[in-house]
Image (tube, rainbow, N blue to C red):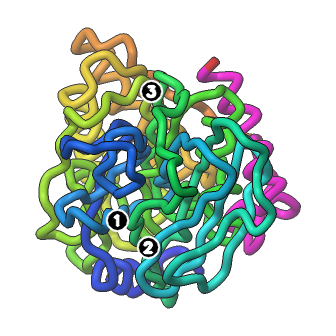
């Protein structure tokens, strides 16, 4: 999708979806029965848990982790959706256009305790799947158990590049997901295709403000940052603002506001402002970081990404990294985050 023509895709995404939650379990009580409110289930990303039987995340890269006993596991889905599953750390299995009860173990697992991870294809643009988690079904007498999950959580804030658009499995093959996995950390991509940093008058969704929200829509409820605390926040924005008429002064002011908001919500996080891969607003990004450093916030850092990828070989369309490009970015970024 060309830069500057993504606003319609964003509008479609906003119209199609409406909610979100977190890397720790929701507040509702649970009994190990596999229902969405089961407190043994761990949610990474911003999940909307207001509907007791159906949890949904509008942002890319959200996922669910659940431990369970027994030899089988099934997902309870509502309407058709593309999703990915991994059992016991195995390869991610794509499951296309599934609905209802989805059998993940036609071949039974060995008896014992297992771990399931589930991630949904982002609902955006022309894709209108029903990314709703309705829990799991287990063997008779089996139950969920608390899974082992990392305490480190890296939050990636960005646009379609951070979503992973044009990579083979979108969020799962995007640099943010890959970086988190490489570092053994929990991770979440607060990103949507076509996003700007500054909320441009022509309708470009501005991450300066959407960072505070549960979902994509303007009227989405404010996110409860008590749900989880990111230990690291990585921001990669500015690819789209220029084509929406955002001035350097507007961009710099918006970046400083976003950095201030990130610090207010995550007092102890390390915050990284990446120079976007097309070198747009680099001076303004560095100036916003310098302003935070000058205010005494030494845990905000600028990352110079120049030379990390080659547009000719590492992108699918001159803009969006391909799988190899995302792997290159993840390798460089993981070394910086350490």
The earlier-in-sequence mark between 2 and 1 is 1
Establish if 51 lies above or below 273.
below
Task: Report the front residue among 325 and 293.
Answer: 325
The residue drawn where x is 29% and y is 14% is: 297
> Where residue 232 is drawn, which disc sits there?
3
User: Residue 131 colored magenta?
Assistant: no
Task: Report the front residue among 14 and 70.
Answer: 70
The earlier-in-sequence mark between 2 and 3 is 2
The residue drawn where x is 66% and y is 47% is: 175
Helix, strand or loop at disc 1?
strand
The CA span between labels 3 and 1 is 24 Å
Establish if 100 lies above or below 71.
below
Where does label 2 land, which residue?
131
Where does label 1 land, which residue?
56
> CB under 8 Å between callouts 2 and 1?
yes
Q: Which region is colored magenta? A: 308-337
What is the quadrant of residue 32 in the picture? top left
Farthest front residue?
Answer: 141
Helix, strand or loop at disc 2?
loop
* Residue 241 visible: no
Q: Report the magenta stretch's main SS.
A: helix
> CB under 8 Å between callouts 2 and 3?
no
Left of 209 or right of it: where is 197? right
């Amino acid at each position: 999708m060309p830069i500057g023509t993504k606003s319609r895709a964003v509008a479609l995404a906003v119209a199609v979806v409406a909610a979100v939650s977190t890397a720790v379990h929701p507040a509702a009580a649970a009994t190990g029965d596999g229902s969405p409110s089961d407190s043994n289930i761990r949610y990474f990303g911003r999940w909307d848990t207001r509907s007791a039987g159906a949890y949904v995340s509008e942002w890319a890269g959200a996922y669910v982790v659940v431990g369970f006993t027994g030899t089988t596991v099934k997902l309870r889905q509502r309407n058709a959706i593309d999703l990915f599953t991994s059992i016991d750390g195995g390869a991610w299995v794509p499951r296309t256009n599934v609905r209802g009860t989805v059998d993940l173990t036609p071949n039974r697992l060995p008896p014992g305790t297992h771990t399931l991870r589930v991630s949904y294809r982002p609902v955006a643009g022309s894709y209108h799947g029903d990314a709703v988690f309705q829990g799991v079904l287990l063997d008779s007498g089996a139950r969920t158990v608390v899974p082992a999950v990392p305490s480190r959580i890296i939050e990636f804030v960005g646009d379609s590049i951070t979503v992973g658009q044009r990579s083979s499995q979108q969020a799962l093959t995007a640099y943010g997901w890959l970086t988190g996995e490489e570092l053994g950390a929990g991770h979440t991509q607060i990103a949507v295709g076509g996003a700007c940093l500054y909320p441009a008058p022509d309708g470009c969704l501005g991450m300066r403000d959407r960072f505070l929200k549960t979902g994509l829509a303007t009227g989405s409820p404010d996110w409860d940052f008590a749900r989880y605390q990111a230990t690291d926040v990585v921001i990669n924005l500015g690819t789209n603002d220029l084509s929406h008429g955002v001035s350097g002064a507007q961009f710099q002011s918006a970046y400083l506001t976003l950095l201030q908001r990130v610090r207010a919500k995550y007092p102890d996080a390390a915050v990284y402002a990446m120079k976007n891969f097309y070198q747009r607003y680099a001076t303004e990004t560095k100036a916003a970081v310098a302003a935070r450093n000058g205010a005494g916030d030494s845990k905000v850092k600028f990352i110079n990404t120049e030379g990390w990828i080659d547009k000719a070989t590492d992108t699918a369309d001159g803009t969006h990294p391909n799988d190899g490009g995302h792997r290159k970015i993840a390798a460089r970024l993981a070394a910086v985050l350490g």
